Image: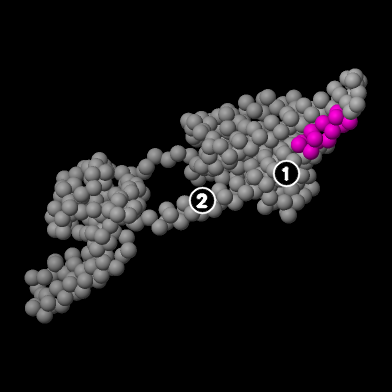
């Protein structure tokens, strides 16, 4: 349309009245179409000039934003906005050169509404001529997300509680049996043999310690982690762990292969929790190779992610167990709490990461942890940073 108008304006002096009438009619039709599109949008759109005066605002924006008056066009945006928090947001960001995306604000007015605001420079022929503001009402979306999180939390808590009850039942039963044996040993006697009683007391102590471990693991699983994230190098964390585990790997007959990316982008992590997650995965890999084998550790940079791969050529995971391995207290071992991978999953998610498992029975398992690389907001290209 712009090229058409430019050509038409160049020839306007040569046009007769009917041609000019047709040109004006075409422009009016085009503007009417654009106006219908704007007014039909469920999201709000607001356009300002370089002096932050309102040039255009659609009905959705008028409905969602708290304006101080009905007359908006040519009015400075900061004067038109009634809400102080949103007004401060515009004041701080309208003159920036970077896009500001998805800042959320909660408004009252009898019922809570959550608005997501984005600011993007309005660019014309390589120059910033103002700003485009996008407004989205995300109230229902956030409510659905909250309901989903509550449902997921309830389901996870139900599974976890059932697992805890099952785990606690076994040591309590053992304690009860050995107390009965001690009672039977003492029944009707003034003196008893201490050796037998000590054997029972030793078993009771072991079961009490087992109960304590179950409770400690349970509390770690359900409590917030309060991770203290800071920029760090995952290569360093993994290397330190492998150095500590070299004797254990050698004793188990496991050959270690490593491949670390260079350079290594830093990610946000809590070193304590990250080491615990990686250690749990290394322990699982070792237990999957009871006759020895090969452990391969690889870090790589892919897109906007750092990935850590831990692979073994052990027994593998049966397909029917793949959907259960992150469930609390699910384990195929004769020892362990069954919370190892549950804790790994929680730690990875706390770091905004993801976890993927590929496994074949008899061939081995590869676990991939993916973590986002913090990105600075990028400036739009194709325009001058100067304002006229």
Residue 12 horizontal/vertical position (percent): 11, 70
How far is disc 1 from disc 2 in space, using C-alphas?
A: 26 Å
Residue 118, how many percent across, how many down? Answer: 32, 50
| Residue 136: quarter of image | bottom left
Instruction: State the extent of the magenta-drawn residues as a range.
Output: 171-184
The kind of secondary structure element at disc 2 is helix
Q: Quadrant of residue 206?
A: top right
Q: Residue 166's mark?
A: 1
> In the figure, is residue 169 to the left or right of 144?
right
The verdict on residue 118 being magenta is no
Question: Around disc 1, counting alpha carbons within 10 Å, would you say few (fewer than 14), some (14 to 19), or many (20 or more)?
Answer: few
Residue that appears at 85% across and 22% down: 198
Question: Is 388 in front, or is 78?
Answer: 78
* Residue at the outermost bottom position: 18
Circles 1 and 2 in contact, beta carbons < 8 Å? no
Residue in the picture at 21% in, 69% down: 31
The residue carrying pointer 2 sits among few (fewer than 14), some (14 to 19) or many (20 or more) residues within 10 Å by Cα, namely: few
Image colouring: one colour
How far from the left and from the top, in percent, is residue 56? 20, 59
Q: Which residue matches tag 2?
A: 149
Instruction: Compare marks 1 and 2 and give the one earlier in the sequence.
Output: 2
Please tell me how many numbered marks the rendered image carries.
2
Q: Quadrant of residue 139?
A: bottom left
- At 55% from the left and 29% from the top, the residue drawn is 271
Our reading of the magenta stretch's main secondary structure is helix
């Amino acid at each position: 349309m712009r090229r058409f108008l430019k050509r038409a304006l160049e020839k306007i002096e040569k046009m007769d009245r009917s041609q000019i009438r047709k040109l004006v009619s075409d422009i009016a039709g085009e503007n009417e179409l654009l106006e219908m599109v704007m007014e039909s949008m469920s999201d709000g759109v607001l356009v300002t000039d370089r002096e932050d005066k309102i040039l255009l605002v659609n009905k959705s924006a008028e409905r969602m934003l708290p304006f101080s008056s009905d007359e908006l066009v040519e009015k400075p945006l900061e004067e038109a906005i009634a809400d102080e928090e949103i007004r401060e947001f515009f004041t701080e960001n309208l003159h920036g050169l970077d896009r500001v995306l998805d800042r959320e604000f909660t408004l009252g007015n009898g019922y809570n509404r959550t608005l997501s605001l984005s600011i993007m420079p309005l660019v014309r022929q390589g120059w910033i001529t103002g700003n485009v503001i996008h407004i989205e009402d995300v109230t229902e979306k956030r409510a659905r997300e909250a309901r989903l999180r509550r449902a997921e939390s309830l389901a996870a808590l139900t599974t976890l509680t059932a697992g805890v009850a099952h785990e606690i039942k076994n040591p309590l039963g053992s304690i009860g049996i050995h107390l009965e044996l001690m009672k039977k040993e003492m029944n009707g006697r003034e003196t008893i043999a201490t050796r037998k009683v000590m054997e029972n007391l030793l078993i009771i102590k072991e079961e009490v310690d087992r109960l304590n471990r179950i409770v400690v693991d349970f509390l770690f699983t359900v409590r917030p982690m309060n991770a203290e994230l800071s920029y760090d190098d995952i290569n360093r964390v993994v290397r330190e762990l492998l150095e500590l585990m070299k004797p254990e790997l050698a004793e188990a007959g496991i050959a270690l292969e490593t491949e670390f990316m260079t350079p290594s982008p830093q990610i946000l992590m809590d070193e304590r929790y990250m080491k615990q997650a990686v250690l749990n995965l290394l322990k699982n890999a070792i237990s999957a190779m009871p006759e020895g084998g090969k452990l391969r550790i690889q870090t790589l940079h892919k897109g906007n992610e750092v990935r850590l791969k831990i692979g073994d050529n052990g027994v593998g995971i049966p397909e029917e167990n793949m959907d259960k391995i992150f469930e609390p207290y699910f384990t195929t071992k004769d020892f362990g709490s069954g919370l190892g991978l549950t804790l790994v999953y929680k730690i990875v998610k706390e770091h905004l990461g993801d976890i993927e498992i590929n496994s074949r029975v008899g061939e081995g398992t590869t676990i991939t942890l993916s973590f986002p690389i913090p990105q600075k907001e990028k400036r739009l290209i194709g325009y001058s940073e100067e304002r006229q």
